[in-house]
Image: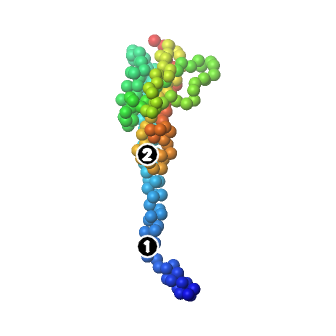
Amino acid sequence: MITRMFRRFRRFSDDEKGNATLEFTLLFPLLMVALLSGVELAFVTLKHAMLERAVDMTVRDIRLGTGVNFQHDDLKTTICERATFIQSCDANMRLEMIQVNPRSALNIDASADCTDRTEEVKPVRTFVNGASNELMILRACAKIDPLFPTSGLGKQLADNAEGQYALVATTVFVQEPQ
């Protein structure tokens, strides 16, 4: 009886049918997670670069003093127009502008103030237009929906109940004299 069982086991272990199928079923999910995470990372980088560029171009307009006294809504609209890859930018972005005394310690909150669809709408945290020769910090925080929210990097990036992640662009500039 034991000899008979060993023969069947040996015949089963020598059979190589289905090896490719087994390898495929083990490796395919891992390769797909890696591929989707790579695509997600590419889009995160693209959107962050576009947000940084939009903020820098808008701040350049402020610094040059083109005669326009920018207010919160004007800045937000301008940044959203220039950040072309960020969807629903007006609804998912918050701006914060802070006057800073260059001769004292920097005292701003390390965490950016971002939107959250699950919470009630909050007013603008701080937004003060600077006078001539004042040092200003402008911080934009946009909440982005992942491209693949249930796999790989998209699942790891989510930092709120809606499954969104935050992209933050910060810039410092001096208000030019009038």
Q: Residues within 10 Å of mark 2 (few under 14, many from 20)?
A: some
Point 40% across, 25% down: residue: 76
* Amino acid type, callout 2: Pro
User: Could you tell me residue 151's position as x and y percent?
Assistant: 45, 50
Please state which of residues 167 and 12 is positioned toward the viewer in this rendering: 12
Please state which of residues 119 and 41 is positioned toward the viewer in this rendering: 119
Residue highlighted by disc 1: 18
The image quarter containing residue 18 is bottom left
* Amino acid type, callout 1: Gly
Residue 174: mark: none
In the structure shown, which secondary structural element does the residue marked by tag 2 occupy? loop
How far is mark 2 from mark 1, CA to CA? 33 Å
User: Could you tell me residue 105's position as x and y percent?
Assistant: 63, 22
Residue highlighted by disc 2: 149
Asked whether residue 46 appears in the rendered view, the answer is no
In the structure shown, which secondary structural element does the residue marked by tag 1 occupy? loop
